[in-house]
Amino acid sequence: MTVAKGFLPRFLPFINKKRTLSQQLMLVGIIITFVFIFLALFAPILQALGLLQDPTEFLDNPIHTPPSLKHWFGTSRLGYDIFSRTVFGAQAALQVVLLATALSMLVGVPLGMLSGYIGGRLDKVLLFIMDSIYTLPGLLLSVTLAFVVGRGIINAALAISIAYVPQYYRVVRNHTVSVKTEVFVEAAQAIGANTWQVLSRYLFLNVIQSVPVLFTLNAADAILVLGGLGFLGLGLPEEVPEWGHDLKQALAALPTGIWWTTLFPGLAMTTMVVGLSLLGEGLNEFVNPRLRKRQ
C-alpha cells in the first residue's frame, strides 16, 4: 500500500484533485491528442455509418457553401465537404507523423548509444555527420528530400524523419556517455558482457528517459512540416485529404470573404500541434527531476 501511495502521485498526478498548472495543461494535451487519434482511427467507420461524407466526393451542392447543419464546416472550391476532409486529414497526419518520428527514433537511438559507448573515431564521425544535418533548417531539408523521393505517405515520412535523427542521436549519446561510467556498467564489463549485452541490458533503459518527450515534441513539429509540404504540393497525393494541401487550395478564396475553407483545416492543425506540445511538456516534468522539485 505504501508503494502504491508513493507511485501514483508521482507518475499519474493528473488523477489527483489538486493539480499544478503544468499537470492541468498536460491533461488538456492528453485530451486533445486522444480526440485526434480517435478521429484518425475511426474516420472510416464514421463514414460507413453515414456520419461523414466521402472526403474525395464532389458534392452536388454549390461550391463555397458556408457552414450549415448539412455541412458543418461548409464546402470547398471544388465542392468537397470540409468537415469530412478535416477529420480524414487527422488520419493522414497521424500516419505520416507516427511513421516519421518512429523512423528517426529507430535510427537515432541506436546510433547514439553506439557512439556514446564505443567513442573514438566512430563517435567523431557520427558527431560530424549529425551536426552537419542538424545545422540545416528542418523544413528546407524535408522539402529538398521530398523533391527527390516524391509524394506519398511513406515518402513524406522519410523526408520529414531525416531532420529529427540528430536530435535523438545527441540526447541518447550524451546520456550514454554519462551512464557508461556507472558502477553497474563496469561490473557488467568485468563479468564478460559484450557490447550488445551492455547496450541492451544495462544502458538502454537508463538512457531513453527523454525519448518519449522528444517523440511528442517532434510529432508536433512534424505536423507543421507535413502541412508545409502539402502547401507546397510536395506532401501527399492531391486526392488524399491533408490540411496543408487544403489550405493551399483555399488561400485564393480568402480575400473574397470565403473564410471557412481556411479556418477549419488551419484550426485543426494548430490544435493538434498544441495538444502534442502540452503533452510533451508534461512528460518532461516527470522525466526531469529538477522540474518536479520546483512544484
Image (spheres, rainbow, N blue to C red):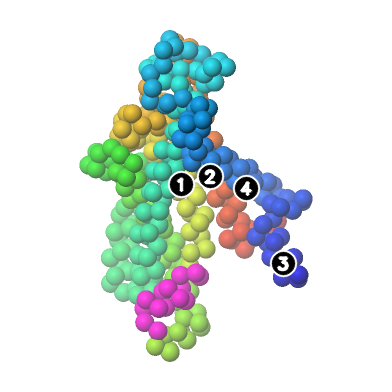
Question: What residue does disc 1 label?
Answer: 219
Q: Residues within 10 Å of mark 2 (few under 14, many from 20)?
A: many
> x%, y% of residue 10?
68, 61
Q: Which residue is mark 2?
A: 276
* Residue with the mark numbered 4: 26
Is 285 displayed left or right of 273 in the figure?
right
Marked residue nearer the N-terminal end (4 or 2): 4
- Tell me the SS state at disc 2: helix
Q: Dots 1 and 2: beta carbons under 8 Å?
A: yes
Residue 288: x percent and y percent?
59, 61
**Front: mark 3 or 4:** 3
Q: Which residue is mark 3?
A: 4
| Main secondary structure type of the part rendered in magenta | helix
How many angstroms separate mark 4 from mark 1 (CA)?
A: 16 Å
Which quarter of the figure is the N terminus placed in?
A: bottom right
Viewer-proximal residue, 84 or 293? 84
Asked if 246 appears above or below 129 in the picture, the reply is above
Residue at 31 percent of width and 47 percent of height: 158
Do callouts 1 and 3 mark residues in contact (Cβ within 8 Å)? no
Q: Are marks 3 and 4 in contact (CB under 8 Å)?
A: no
Mark in front: 2 vs 3: 3
Q: Secondary structure at mark 3?
A: helix
Tell me if mark 3 has few (under 14), some (14-19) or many (20+) residues whose alpha carbon lies within 10 angstroms of its own: few
- Magenta segment, which residues? 193-206
Secondary structure under badge 4? helix
Q: Residue at x 65, y 60 (%)?
A: 11
- The number of callouts visible is 4
Report the amino acid beneath label 1: Ala
The residue under the point 33% across, 57% down is 131
Dot 4 surroundings within 10 Å: few (below 14), some, or many (20 or more)?
A: many
Instruction: Answer with mark 4 or mark 1, whichever residue precedes in sequence.
Output: 4
